[in-house]
Amino acid sequence: MSDTGAGSDQGAAGDAEQRDETAWMPPTGPPPPPPITVPGHHLPGTGYGPPTAGPGHQPPGAGYGPPTAGTPFGPYPPAGPPSSGGRNRALVVAVVALSVLLLVACSGLIGGAFLLRSSERQTAEREPAAPPVTPWRSPGTTPTPGATASAEPSTRGPQPSDFPAAQISDLNDVCDGVRYFPQSPKRTGAAPHPVALLVGTDLGAGSRRHDRVYYYDEGLSKQVERTWASEDPKTVQMVACLDRTSTGATIRKCRYDDPEPDTLTLLKATYRLRVYEVATGRRLLDKTMGGDDQQCPYVVLYGSDKKIYAEVSHRSLLSALRNLVKR
């Protein structure tokens, strides 16, 4: 019985030694978490790729949650085409960058347009409108830098022409006060002094016809024609401008049969006769004349209103011009 008790004591002592050895082992904590990776990237010094599907993972495109302790990672898969998530993110980045560039460009354009309009408005408020400048200038002069040509008559009066009159109709510019022709002969020396009569029409301002029959009472020779109705503007010293200025009451009705029957109304009228020296634009005569020829004209030009006007008779015109031509 004493042996049996000793054996029990020895067994108890052995168990105590084993328990003491177990209690002396250093405590162990939970294993360290595995490295967190980003899809498509390696961690330096590791062979790990993106985490495999399992606890602690979310599908591509939804982000990754914290990995669960102890979750193994598989080996990095072979290289291949980028995932659809990478392409989508690249596309989003490109679209955002392009949108920013477009916004910057549009902002620059809009700002420039506003600046331009603001500059134009300030310029208009700061500077008065410049008067129109005539395109005609005297011989040998140099145009002012920045000057613009204009068809309107100069506010300074008629300007000298750089070239001679090429046809009688050019003398309308003398009547309108636009220019004169220094190359034409002046009204000097012995008479006669050739004149051209330009009569206003209803075709608009500045529209006049060359009257070549009003002088018949003076004769029909070539010499008389060259004096009173020359067709060569280089020989004309004066231009006579006859324009209707007002109309009055009805005188009579005029009936015409050709080319078809029609009736026109003849009205009273008043005219202004001005005579200018072609070479200088100097005015030699300014006279108001009444339409004293109140008979229905043999040939007439009329408009849709079917009105015609009493004209200045040829005799009155010759009387008004005779002293200037023959003296």
Image (cartoon, helix red, strand yellow):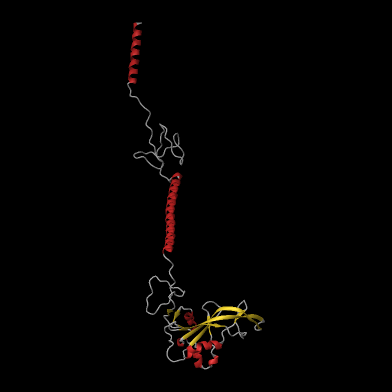
Q: Judge whether 104 appears above or below 201 on screen.
A: above
Where in the figure is residue 139, as x and y percent of width and height? 39, 80
Q: Is residue 309 left or right of residue 168?
A: right
User: Quarter of the image holding residue 281?
Assistant: bottom left
Number of marks drawn: 0
Where in the figure is residue 258, as x and y percent of width and height? 65, 84
**Residue in the picture at 42% in, 53% down:** 104
Q: Judge whether 271 appears above or below 89 on screen.
A: below
- For this rendering, which residue is in front, 22 or 172? 172
> Looking at the rendering, in which quadrant would you find the N terminus?
top left
Whether residue 213 is visible to the viewer of this picture, yes or no, is no
Q: Is residue 41 left or right of residue 274?
A: left
- For this rendering, which residue is in front, 87 or 183? 183
Where in the figure is residue 163, as x and y percent of width and height? 42, 81
**Residue in the picture at 55% in, 87% down:** 316
User: Quarter of the image holding residue 51?
Assistant: top left
Q: Judge whether 90 appears above or below 324 on screen.
A: above
Whether residue 262 is visible to the viewer of this picture, yes or no, is yes
Where in the figure is residue 24, as x and y percent of width and height? 32, 21
